[in-house]
């Protein structure tokens, strides 16, 4: 799918954006100029229902109810648990705060990155890398034999941390191999080409051999 | 469906429970003694796929992709946002802490209920009641003309707060009427009959006219 990306600083709480998604969270997709789908996991379900059904073995959500539970469980693991414990802290402290006003940053302890939160995120990520390693020692991809939304959710969050040099790849060789496979897929090129203004990526961010 | 309810104190982090759901969260269902489905929203999707498809106009997730987005959005609103802002605080401070050890309660500021968190929850719930009122002024049920998982998610969380006398019903007459309709449904009887040992419900908890 071709999409036009629009940057939304959710902490601005723009009324026009809150009208699209009253929860005020990103990501949100707008289709045909008017139909709105919020939340990463709900977007995944919607794309599956409107495009995935005809994709055969490239479908990102499997057919059987049991296999779907595992994809959804791991999608939620990364979109909610990993986000809460790792990527949310890193992005808020290291990126969002650079664009916030003093007033906006006050409820997050001010404009300086909170080193305790960054340290907590860097510690928490180790356990998630172990979990990725554990899963991919038993299966080809995170939720089973086929690539699924679970891999994309995990790789999306990991890539943000990797951009910020916050993934200790030496901790788990198997997790690193899984990410190398994801990274080499053509669909990942856009993510690797993304740049945050004023924040260059880690040295190995785009390397397929890292 | 008939289910056997099993109490799990997730803060105990029992290895046997973590084997069922590595995220350590409730609810979890176990079907046929072995197949495990975690997380309220994933359980809802699973029940729809294994039972809901044949339920006709009693199905709790609608057919069209667009209508499904709205049910999922509101299910997530209550299972995640309302939980984070309201019910989680109330349950943790007023119920879970009564069953925790000193050690378990330490990371939550000790065994005494944190009155700031309880006060925050009581303030936050007003805005959610307004949202329920706003939605049900435009629609028969929360996500549309039919009862859906969105109503059940909202009512499940609200009923917990109502048990604890923490729903200011006078704030929104329309939200109150929506809850009265849910409360009078036969499927809600089990929830109204539930009791927490040592914590009696609010006086009006079971009243259909409250």
Image: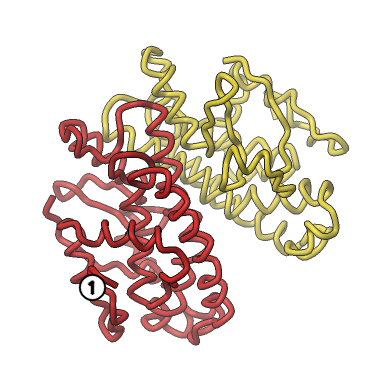
Chain colours: A yellow, B red
Which quadrant of the figure contains the C terminus of chain B?
bottom left
Residue A135 versus residue A121 in the image, above or below: above
User: Does residue B129 appear to the left or right of A193 in the view shown?
Assistant: left
**Which residue is at the front of the view, B95 or A90?**
B95
Question: x%, y% of residue B190?
Answer: 17, 64
Q: Where on the picture, by quarter, is residue A52?
A: top left
Residue position for label 1: B207
Question: x%, y% of residue B26?
Answer: 35, 59
Query: For the point 28% across and 86% down, which residue is it?
Result: B198
Question: x%, y% of residue A30?
Answer: 58, 27
- Dot 1: what SS? loop
Question: x%, y% of residue A10?
Answer: 69, 45
Q: Where on the picture, by quarter, is residue A190?
A: top right
Residue B171 versus residue B52 in the image, above or below: below
Label 1, residues with CA under 10 Å away: few <14, some 14-19, many ≥20: few
Query: For the point 84% across and 38% down, which residue is it?
Result: A199
User: Which residue is the extreme one toward the left?
Assistant: B2
């Amino acid at each position: 799918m071709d999409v036009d990306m629009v940057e939304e600083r959710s902490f601005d709480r723009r009324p026009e954006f809150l009208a699209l998604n009253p929860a005020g969270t990103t990501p949100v997709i707008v289709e045909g100029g008017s139909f709105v789908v919020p939340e990463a996991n709900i977007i995944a379900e919607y794309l599956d229902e409107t495009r995935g059904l005809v994709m055969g073995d490239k479908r990102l959500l499997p057919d059987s109810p049991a296999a779907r539970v595992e994809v959804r469980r791991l999608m939620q693991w990364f979109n909610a648990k990993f986000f809460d414990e790792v990527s949310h802290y890193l992005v808020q402290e290291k990126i969002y705060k650079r664009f916030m006003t003093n007033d906006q940053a006050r409820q997050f302890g001010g404009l300086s990155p909170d080193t305790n939160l960054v340290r907590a995120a860097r510690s928490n990520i180790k356990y998630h890398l172990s979990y990725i390693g554990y899963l991919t020692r038993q299966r080809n991809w995170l939720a089973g034999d086929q690539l699924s939304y679970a891999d994309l959710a995990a790789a999306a969050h990991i890539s943000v941390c990797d951009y910020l040099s916050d993934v200790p790849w030496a901790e788990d060789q198997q997790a690193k191999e899984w990410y190398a496979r994801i990274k080499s897929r053509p669909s990942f090129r856009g993510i690797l080409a993304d740049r945050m203004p004023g924040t260059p990526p880690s040295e190995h961010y785009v390397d397929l051999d890292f």
